[in-house]
Amino acid sequence: MKVEQLYTGCLAEAAYYIESNGEAAIIDPLRETEPYLKKLEERGAKLKYILETHFHADFVSGHIDLAKKTGATIVFGPTALAEYDIHVAKDGEDLKLGDVTIKVLHTPGHTMESSTFLLVDENGKDYGIFTGDTLFIGDVGRPDLAVKTDLSREDLARHLYDSIQNKIMPLADDVIVYPGHGKGSACGKNMSDETTDTLGNQKEKNYALQPMEKEEFVEKVVDGLTPPPQYFPKNAVLNKMGYESFDSVIEKGLKALDPNTFEDLANAHDALIIDTRLPEEFVAGFIPNSIFIGVEGSFASWVGTLVIDLKQPILFIADEGKEEEVVTRLSRVGYDNTIGFLKGGIEAWKTAGKELDYIQSINPHAFAGLVEKTKMPTIVDVRRYSEFNQGHLLNANNIPLDYINDNMARFNREEEYYVHCAGGYRSVVMASILKSRGFEKVVNIEEGFGGLQEKTNLPIVSDVLEPEA
C-alpha cells in the first residue's frame, strides 16, 4: 500500500494518491491532470477511483478531465448531485482498491454532501481518514460554503457536530488524519502548519474535538468567521456543473503576443492586464492600468478575491518560463478566459517605445522622517483585521486588500495615501488597483509593517484588549 500527500502551498491544498496492488485512487485532484497521469505511468498503476470529499469552493478540481482521460469512476458521498456521471456512494459503502478498502463515511456539515474516506489496510486495520474540509489539523471546516442550501451556517454547524461525534471521534487514536487543507486556506480559521497528525493528538489539541454540548460547538465554530472570498461559490458551481477542459484553457492562454497585438487585444476585449512579476519590478515600470498580482505570492487566491468576473478576459505579463504556471494557477480557481501574454515581457514593451506608469515608493527610514517633519500623512494599512488589531501604526486606517472592492468610496482622488501591508506584496497590489482606477497620489511603503517595526521608532498601538489583572 502506498499513500502520498500531494500538497500545493499556494492554495494550502492537499490531494492524495493511494495505491494497492496496481490499482490507484486520487482524492481531491487539482485542475491540471498531467502530474497525476505521469505518476500513474511511473508506477504502472491503473486509476480506479477519483474520490471527491465535497464540491470544493476554493479551487476547481481536475476530477472531470481526469476521469475522461483514464476511465476512472468519480465518487462523491451521499446527496451529491452533479451534471456529469458520478457514483454517489452510500454511507458506509466499501470501495475495494487492490488489497485495501476505502470506506465512505458521510460527514455533512461543511457542506451536506461532505464525506470522509476511511482507508482500511490489507490486514483490515483502520489506517487513515481523508477528511476533506470536515476536519483539519487544529480546526474543522467552516459551515457556510454549501451551494444553494436553505440551511443556515448554524444548521450546518449542528450537522458538523453530529458528524464529528458519530463518525470521527469513535475511530482509534492511531488513525492518521489527512485533511484537505493546511494553514493559509480560507476554508477554516485556526489551522495548524502541520498537514497530517494522528487522530488521538487531534482529540487532545483540536478545540473542536473537546467535550462540549452541540450549541457550544456551534458557537465556537461560527465565531469570528469572516465572509468567504467572492469566488468560492462560483468555484463550487463549476465543480458541480462542469467546466472547460484544462487543455483548451492552456492552449488559449499560452499565446505569445507582440506589444502591438497585446495592446490591440486589451482594447478590443476590455481585457484585464495582470502583471505577475516581483513587486519591486512592477513599481519600477508597468503598463498603464495593469494591476500587480505576483505569481510568487498567493496568486490564485488573490485573483479570485479581487477579480469579480470569472469570464473576464485576461492578458498577463510574466517572467520568461513562468507563462504556463500563470495560466495553470488562474485555471485552478476558475479563471479560464486568459487570452495571451506579452512576448518578451516588459522589456519588449519598452523597446516598442510604449508608455510606462510607475508607483512611487518610500523606505521605512524615509517614511519615519516624513512623519517627523510634517503632519501625519494618511496611512492605509491593507492587512487583514486580525493582523491590524495585533499591532498597527498610530492613526493608520485599516482597509484590508480583501475588501477593496467594497471600500472604494473611502478614497479621495485629491488625497495622498501611504500604503503598506506586512511585507510589501499586498500593498503593491492595492496601490496598482488604486492607480488603475485613477488615484494618482499613492505611495507604497517598502518592507511593510515588518520594516516599519524593525527600522523605525514610529508609535505602534494594539486594538487587542489586555486581560484584566
Image (cartoon, grey):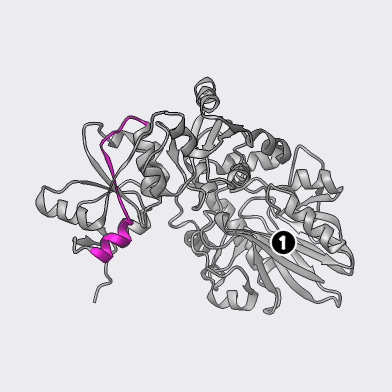
Indicate yes or no whether the magenta region holds residue 300: no
Q: Which residue is mark 1?
A: 16
Q: Residue at x 38, y 49 (%)?
A: 280
Q: Is residue 252 above or below residue 77?
A: above
Question: Within 10 angstroms of label 1, few (less than 14), some, or many (20 or more) residues?
Answer: some
In percent of width and height, residue 29 lies at 71, 53
In percent of width and height, residue 6 lies at 68, 61
* Quarter of the image where one finds residue 120: bottom right
Task: Please report the bounds of the magenta region as a residue range.
Answer: 437-455
Left or right relative to 332: residue 264 = left
Left or right relative to 322: residue 442 = left
Q: Is residue 436 above or below residue 108?
A: above
In percent of width and height, residue 113 lies at 70, 50
* Quarter of the image where one finds residue 431: top left
**Residue 296 versus residue 206: which sits nearer the camera?**
296
Indicate yes or no whether the magenta region holds residue 447: yes
> Residue lying farthest top?
268
Q: Residue at x 60, y 60 (%)?
A: 181
In percent of width and height, residue 54 lies at 68, 51
**Residue 218 versus residue 335: which sits nearer the camera?**
335
